Image (tube, coloured by chain):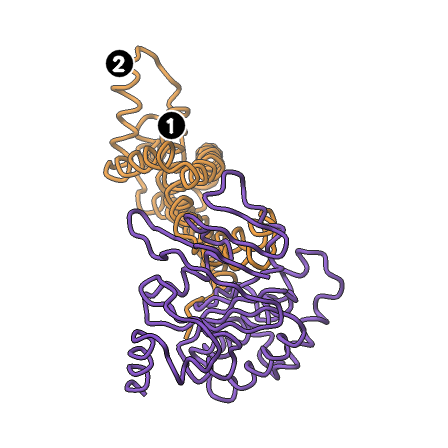
Amino acid sequence: MLKGENIRKSYGDVEILHGIDINIQPGTITTIIGPSGSGKSTLLRSLALLDPPTSGTVTIDDLTMTFPHDTPIPTELVWPRLTVVFQQLFLWPHLTLRQNAVLPLRSRDIDSPEDRVDQIIKDFGINGLADRFPNEVSLGQRQLGAIVRALALEPRYLLLDEITSALDVEYVAMILERLKTLREQGVALLLISHLIEFARHSGDQIVFLDGGTLVEQGTPAILDNPQSGRLERFLGLVLEAR
Amino acid sequence: MNFLQITQQYGDAMLGGLFVTLKLSFIVWASGIVIGSALGALGASFREIVGGPSKVVSVILAGMPALVFLFWMHYPLQGYLQIVINPFITGALTLSIINIFMVADLVRGAITDFPRQYIDAAKVSGMSHSDIFVRIQVPLLMRQIIPGLLLIQITVFQMTIFASMISVDEIFRVAQRVNSIIYKPVEIYTLLALFFIAVCVPLNLFAHWLRVRFTRDYSER
C-alpha cells in the first residue's frame, strides 16, 4: 500500500499542497486529474520521496515516514520498488533506449538484464528502435523507452506523470492494456493524465486536485456525475477545449 | 642562411628552448587539469565557501591580460615580498594559476548545470550513488568538459611564450636570440610558427574528434 496522509509541500513560503490524503492499493490504478498548477506532479514527487513532503506521513508497505524527517530517508528500501516515469522522461542521452533500460538492472546485479529488457521491447514492438539514442527517435517513442526502463525494474508501485502526452491513439491503447496487465499482477499504479477518456478507462480511482487541495475522489463515475462544482467546471472546460 | 642551415647551426639551442616550453606546458597542463578539476568539483559542492570565491578569482583573472598578471607576479609581488623567484617558476606558477581557474570555471559550470533530472531518474531506478556518479554523471560531464578543456590547454600552451618576457629561455626567447644574431626573421619565425602549429593543430583536431566522437548532439526532436 502506498499511502499519503495530510501531505503538505511548501517551496519557501509558498505552500503547494495543502494537506492531501491519498491511498493507493496494490492491484489498482489511481488517476490524478486537475488543471495545470494544481499540484499533481508535486504530489507525485512527494509520494515518490524525490521531493519529500514538508509535513505529513508517507507509508510504503511496512515503511512509514513522518515528515519533517530527522534521519536520512532509507530510499534504498523505496526505489525501485517504487519507481517513476517522468513527464519529461529523462532518458540518459548517452545511452541507447536498450542501454537505458539495462543499466539500472546491471547496477542491481540482476541476471540476464538484456533478456528481460528485450522481452519488454518485443512486447511493445519497438525492436527496431532499441539501439537508437533518445534524440534519434520521436517523443512518443522516447516515452515508450522510458516506460520500458520502468517496467524492466518490475516495480510494485509505478508512478507515471503524463506518459501519454505525446503518444498517438494506438500507443495509448497499447499502454493502457499494459497498465491493466500490471494491475492484474498486483502492481499499484498512480497516473497523472490530462486525458479524461484515458482516466475514465484506466482508473479504478480518480483523484481530482485543484489549487493543491484534493477536491474530489471516487470511481470513474465521478467524471459523469461530479459532486463538486470545481470538478464540474474543470470537466466542462476540458470538454470545451476538445 | 636557409631553414636547413639555421636548424643545423642553432638546432641545439632551439631544442633547448623547445624543451623548456614543453616542460613549462606540462607543468601548467598537469596542475591546471588536476587542481582545476578538483577546485571546480569542490566549488560545485561547496558553493558559498569554495565556488563563490573561486568564481570571483576567475572573473578577475579573465579581466586581466595574462602578460600583466605575469609581470605583476614577477616584479611588484616579489618586490613587495622581498623575495626573488626563478623566472621559470614564476612563469609556471602564473600560467598554472590562470589554467587552474579557467579549468575550475569550466568544471564547476558543467557540474552545476548538470540536469538533476537525470540523477532523479537514476535514483528511482534504484541505482547506487556510486553507479550514478560513474555511469551517468561522469560520462555526461566528460563529454561536456573535454573539448572545452582541450581548447583551454591550447590557449595556455600559446601563453607560454609570455614567459620569454621575464627571461625564461623558452622557444620564443631562443628564437629571438637567434634572430638577433643572424637576422633571418622570416625563416626563424616561420619555424616557430610551424612548431606551434605542429603542436596546436593536432590538439585542436583531437578536441574536434572528441567532440564528434563523444559529444553527440543531444538535442531532442
Contact between marks 1 and 2 (CB within 8 A): the answer is no
Amino acid marked by disc 2: Tyr
Q: Mark 2 — on which chain does it sit? A: B
Instruction: Tell which tag, 1 or 2, sits nearer the viewer.
Output: 2
Please state the horizontal and vertical placement of residue B192, each as a whole percent of the image. Answer: 38, 44
Q: Is residue B93 left or right of residue A78?
A: left
Residue at 38 percent of width and 27 percent of height? B168
Sequence-wise, which precedes: disc 1 or disc 2?
2
Residue at 29 percent of width and 85 percent of height? A241
Rendered colour, chain B: orange
**Rounded to the nearest whole Å, what is the CA distance between mark 1 and mark 2?**
21 Å
Marker disc for residue B168:
1
Rendered colour, chain A: purple
Marker disc for residue B80:
2
Q: Is residue A130 above or below residue A99?
A: below
Please state the horizontal and vertical placement of residue B201, each as a whole percent of the image. Answer: 43, 54
User: Of all residues shown, which one is farthest toward the right?
Assistant: A111
Number of marks in the rendered image: 2
Q: Report which quarter residue B221 is drawn in.
A: bottom left
